[in-house]
Amino acid sequence: MIGAIHVSLSALRQNAQALRDLVAPSAAAFVVKGNAYGHGIIETALAVEPFAKKLCVYSVEEAAALREGGITIPILIMGPVPPEHFDDTLELDAEMALWDMHEYVHALASAAKKARRRIKVHVKVNTGLNRLGLETDELADAIEDYCHVPDIEIAGIFSHLAAAEEIDSPYTMHQLDRFKKAYSHAEPVLASQGAIPMRHIAASAAAMLWPQTRLDMCRIGIALYGLWPSPQTREAMNGGKLPLQPALSYITELVTTRQIAAGEPVGYGTTFHAPRAMRVGVLPLGYADGIPRALSNNGSVLIDGARCPIIGRVAMNMCIVDLTHAPQAKSASRVTLIGRDGEEEITAEDWGTWSNSINYEIVSRIPESLPRVYTDG
């Protein structure tokens, strides 16, 4: 076995239910972009669909995968949709983000009219992340323009927070205030058309730490997978006993073991020299398989319930570990890269710390080519 990702469907369902209940009466939309943060988009979506108001993706291709996989609830495409994919979006009955007031809107309306369907849009407002979205002082005029396009239905108005993971975050309140003011200026136009769009600005961290940001709907991503948006979020929420369970484990087997003499180098660049005679093991995975190269001489795996340090450089498809604390390990011994073995556990957060990254990046960069094994219970 080269390696496999094990995903607990019951953990996903438990997380989805706990998060839905946490944000109620606001609705819960679950984010499954990036192959469901590495967990597998179809299986994840099917597991959490009963608890979701919507599922959120980044691209038309992801929306198509969900529909082909049997998802029937509303899907929101949050990333840019090229005009050549308008027909696909309409055919999928997907909702899409919109932050344009010019030719793009007319092309979208033309495609909807041709398909004899109304396209549901969520109008994005830039409140301070300064990435995508209309400026706050443009929103009212844009809404008025959109309301005069019969082929467009305004289903939502939303923004995205920049610093909600912080316990003390005046900027989060600043963004929320800007959003509410912009919406209040657009509200009379919406009311005149009988439109009541869903307002949403909170992702996982804000939904936990800032209840006032929950509005009508929360877009929950990382927390769905039992991972915390930040250490501060975990510390704050564990007081409330929010029962999140990591759903993903990363498992492989030792290819072989070998004895090396004191002073011998290990791996490319000879960055590790054995301080004594020692036994090492070879793993059939490397940075092409989602193990950050930054874990070179700076991470561990679990074998026989013991932590075994990674020694030498992580190569493209292999890395080497010190077997001092797992003396019985042999070829085909089980290796846990992420997950629990006995009393020990290695988490995606550990990988993030070791590689100066975050758990979001760790799990979402696990290649889709690695097999996913789904368990229930």
Image (cartoon, rainbow, N blue to C red):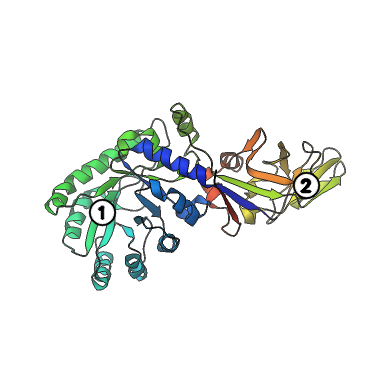
Q: Is residue 301 above or below residue 54?
A: above
Q: Is residue 207 above or below residue 287?
A: above
The picture places residue 149, in percent across and down from the top left corner, at 18, 63
Three-letter amino acid code at disc 2? Gly
Q: Quadrant of the N terminus?
A: bottom right
Three-letter amino acid code at disc 1? Ala
Mark 1 Cα-neighbour bin, 10 Å: few <14, some 14–19, many ≥20: some
> What residue do we see at 40% from left, 58% from top?
71
Image-based side of 353 in relation to 167, left or right: right
Question: From this viewpoint, which residue is outermost toward the bottom?
Answer: 114
Q: Secondary structure at mark 2?
A: strand
Find disc 2 in the rendering and name its residue: 281
Image-based side of 212 in relation to 271, left or right: left
Residue 207 sits in quarter: top left
**Frontmost residue, 246 versus 231:** 246
> What residue do we see at 23% from left, 55% from top?
154
Give the number of marks: 2
Instruction: Say which label, 1 or 2, has the lower sequence index.
Output: 1
Q: Quadrant of the C terminus?
A: top right
Q: Is residue 197 visible?
A: yes
Q: Which mark is residue 155?
A: 1
Q: Is residue 164 visible?
A: no
**Frontmost residue, 60 versus 83:** 60
Mark 2 Cα-neighbour bin, 10 Å: few <14, some 14–19, many ≥20: many
Residue 297 sits in quarter: top right
The picture places residue 92, in percent across and down from the top left corner, at 35, 64
The picture places residue 375, in percent across and down from the top left corner, at 57, 48
Q: Is residue 154 above or below residue 295?
A: below
Question: From this viewpoint, which residue is outermost toward the front?
Answer: 377
> What residue do we see at 42% from left, 34% from top?
166
Q: Secondary structure at mark 1?
A: strand
